[in-house]
Every structure is written in structure tokens, then in C-alpha cells.
Image (cartoon, grey):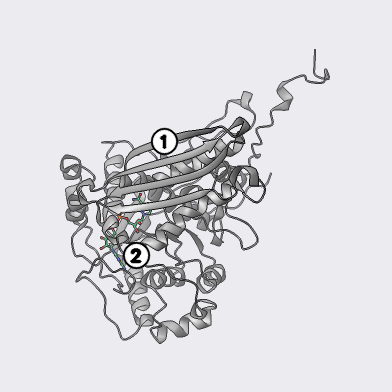
Amino acid sequence: MAKIKIEPANGKLGILLPGLGAVSTTFIAGVMLARKKKLLPIGSLTQMQTIRLGKRDEKRAPLIKDFVPLANLSDLEFAAWDIFPDNAYEAAIKAGVLSKEHLDIVKDELEKIRPMTAVFDKSFIKNINGPNVKTGKNKLELANQLREDIRNFKKEKNLSRMVVVWCASTESYMEKQPVHESIEAFEKGLAESHPMISPSMIYAYAAIMEGVPYTNGSPQLTLDIPALADLARQKGVPIAGKDFKTGQTLVKTAIAPMFKARMLGVRGWFSTNILGNRDGLVLDDAGSFKSKEISKKSSLEYIFQPGMYPELYKGMYHKVRIEYYPPKNDDKEGWDNIDIFGWMGYPMQLKINFLCKDSILAAPIVLDLALFMDLAQRAGMRGMQEWLSFYFKAPMHAPLLYPEHDLFIQHMKLKNTLRYLMGEGMITHLGIEYYDYWGTGKE
Ligand SMILES: NC(=O)c1ccc[n+]([C@@H]2O[C@H](COP(=O)([O-])OP(=O)(O)OC[C@H]3O[C@@H](n4cnc5c(N)ncnc54)[C@H](O)[C@@H]3O)[C@@H](O)[C@H]2O)c1
């Protein structure tokens, strides 16, 4: 199999983060601690996972980072935008995810990361407000200011490449509008400050125009509009989204394939969460919650295929709740009650109580996405990167396809894509050649 031409990962990679909150600071501080060899980057495939190559008896299983040319942690530089002026150390202390003891090891480095002024619009995020924001005569001018920030970061840090990963708050739910339908309509909308162009769309537009890959870690529409998808293809830029798959949906997309694989029916699935961080505060607003609810609910329908298996899954009741409960802080607690049925329709239940740390689960995803999106760009892959569905609650996909939500299929797709890029054979798990089923093997 021919290997795809991939530019080497020479020089430094800049990671630009809209939002310098719990996820961003946990990610940045974690990378700094990992490169000082103080703590391990647990949860990151790019840093810790191996990839099997060839047949099982060949015993070839290098680390992913030794197999594909990825940027080294030592070559990463960080920048962020936020509506609050706190530097990364102050923001991390406020987020309360990593301990002061750990943060103090990299305090000097963190303090140097001061957020650039943000593009913010209160009509898209209701429950917070901050002073560190850009002003301009229209949205096009704001986009141009972001483009200048991106160029300045590149120059200042002497970077060879950059990626943007959205880690800012969830914007209000919005449906696609005519202003999103084409690049021309969108650019006209920017110049006229059209109210249906959200800040995240302005960041994405600025990144793509600068030739920088853009990843959407939150559930809002941003990239799912023809204008930005077309722009990304036109400019040869990879895009990916949406909404990091961390706690409950991670569990859901691992457990649901088990019921489906064993042909067990599901009558109802009730999921509830309590969390108390700033993300929880933003999601306490109905508009932001709706974006999240839709993203969290989409997976089961596609995994169970009720149209194909009506006796097992048609009419399944699926409810998702998120409650803001400040004492929990970043320690999110999720409960799932699943009403299932088996042989002869006899009912059973599965209950899951996941006590997780939201940002601890999200940080390695940010790292992997940043490194894989940079790889995609160096491999000349433009437009939506469906092979990264593994990391998202509501993965982007080609218009003719349904999204793939099954965690294990997503995982296989990711690894097969890496094998494909490097000219290695796909792994099918057939393995029939190891057995002598028909007596045709060598005696
Ligand atoms: N932690 C997880 O497990 C997880 C999973 C999936 C998605 N997400 C999403 O990731 C995002 C970040 O989560 P978090 O826990 O770090 O939230 P957070 O509230 O701690 O941080 C978000 C930051 O974004 C800033 N912000 C808001 N609007 C902005 C704008 N227009 N420009 C720049 N900055 C802006 C806020 O001031 C805040 O500091 C949220 O949208 C969340 O829904 C998180």
C-alpha cells in the first residue's frame, strides 16, 4: 500500500485556544507537567497507546507517536483568548481541577499565558460576562483582529504551524440560517454584523482564512454550516467537531454497542448529571443547554438503529438532564438508569454512577486532537476529519452518511486511518489464516 506524503513535523506547533477555563488550563498545565516528566499524560492515545501493525504473530506494535510523525510535546506553544483577564495560572487555580502543588511546579510558564481579548456576544452566552473583549465596527473587523492575533502569535513564538481548538463556553442553540449557506452570504453577513453569526463562527472563519485547522470542542453549530465547510475545503484546511466526548456519552457509546451486539432490547435510558463548574453555570441557561442536549442525545438513535430493529429499540424513551449544582465544582456526577429486556422480553436494569472529573477526561482529548489535526494538515487532508469521530459526541460526517457513534468502531476507524496514512495494511480481525477449518492448511 502506498504511503501518503506527510510533511515532517519540523519546528514548533502553536495551539490556540478560544477559552482559558477549566479544560484549557488542565490541558496546558498537564502538557507542561508531562514534558517535565512530573506526571503522565494518561488518557492520551498519541502519547500512551500502541498500534498493532500486520498480523498478530508479527508482534509489531509501536507507540502511535513513534509510528506517525506527530509534533513533540516539547515543541508545543500555547495561546488563548478569554473574556476574563486571568492568566493561565490564576484561571487554573480558580477552575480548581489540578492541585496547587502541581500547578506551582509550572507556575512561571503558566503565568506567561495571558488571554488575548475575546470576541464575545452576550446573546449567545447568557450566564457569564467579562471585560476582556474586542471592539470593532463590525464582525468582519473582529475576525480581522483575530487573524492578526494568530499571525502575531506565530511571529512571536517563531512557530512553523498552528491549530485552534475551541474550549470556550457553549453557545446557545441555533439552526442553520440563509446567512450560513455560502461563503459569499457569510462574508456579507460579517460585514453587516448579522445577528446569526456567532463568536465561535468568527473564530473559525479567522482560523480557516489563516490556513489554521479548527476543532470545535463544544456542541454549538460553528462548523456545521456550508459557508465554513466550503471555506475549509477551498483553503485546504482540516476541520473537526463537535463536542468532546468525555463522561456520560463516552460511557453511553461504549455500553449501547454491547446491548446491540447481544440483541438485548432497551425500553428507556435516563441520564442525569450534576456539575458545578463555570461550564455548568453556562449550561444552566436554556439556550446553551439545548445545544448540549441535542449533542448528547444524538448517539443512541444511531447506535440502536430502531428502524432496523423495531422489536428491540422502537419507541425507546431517552432523557438527558444536566443540573447546575455549585458544590460539585468540576467533579461531575452522572447517573444512568437503563431499562433493558432480554430473552422472551423479561425486564432487567443497569445502573451506572460515574463520578468523574470533567476536565481530567477532556484534557487528553484536546492534546490528541491538536496533534492529529496538525498531522492531517501535513498529510494534505482538507475539510471535515470524520476519522476523529472517536473524540466527539456529535461527530461531523459527509452529508450522505449517518454519523458513527459506536466507540469501538470509531477507535478502529482512527487506527486504520493512521495505518492507511503510513502505507500499512488495514486490520480486519478476520484471522482465519491461523486455523485449519477446511483441512486445507499445512499438516
Ligand atoms: N469538560 C468536559 O468534559 C467537556 C466535554 C465536552 C465539551 N466541553 C465543552 O468545553 C468547553 C469548555 O469547558 P470548561 O469546563 O473549560 O468551561 P469553562 O467555563 O471553565 O471555560 C470556558 C471559558 O471560555 C470563556 N469564554 C466564553 N466565551 C468566550 C469567547 N467568546 N471567547 C473566548 N473565551 C470565551 C469563559 O470565560 C471561560 O473562561 C465548554 O463549552 C464545554 O461544554 C467540555
Q: Looking at mark 2, is its residue's CB closer than 8 Å to ligand 1? A: no
Badge 1: how crowded within 10 Å, few (<14), some, or many (20+)? few
Amino acid type of disc 1?
A: Lys
Q: In which quarter of the image is the C terminus?
A: top right
Q: Where is residue 383 in the image (x, y as percent from the top left)?
A: 55, 63
Element class at badge 2? helix
Query: In which quadrant of the rendered view does residue 122 lie?
Result: bottom left
Q: Nearer the viewer, residue 199 or 136?
A: 199
- Rendered image: mark on residue 351: 1
Q: Position of residue 395 (x, y in %)?
A: 51, 55
Query: Is residue 239 found left or right of 42 in the rendered image?
Result: right
Q: Position of residue 335 (x, y in %)?
A: 37, 42
Gap between marks 2 and 1, in whole Å?
Answer: 27 Å
The answer to which of marks 2 and 1 sits earlier in the sequence is 2
Q: In the picture shown, does residue 237 fall above or below 321?
A: below
Q: In the picture shown, does residue 45 fall above or below 169?
A: above
- Rendered image: mark on residue 286: 2
**Residue at figure coordinates x 82%, y 20% from the top left:** 438
**Residue at figure coordinates x 42%, y 78% from the top left:** 196
Amino acid type of disc 2?
A: Ala
Q: Which of 432 and 251 is in front in this view?
A: 251
Q: Nearer the viewer, residue 97 or 256?
A: 256
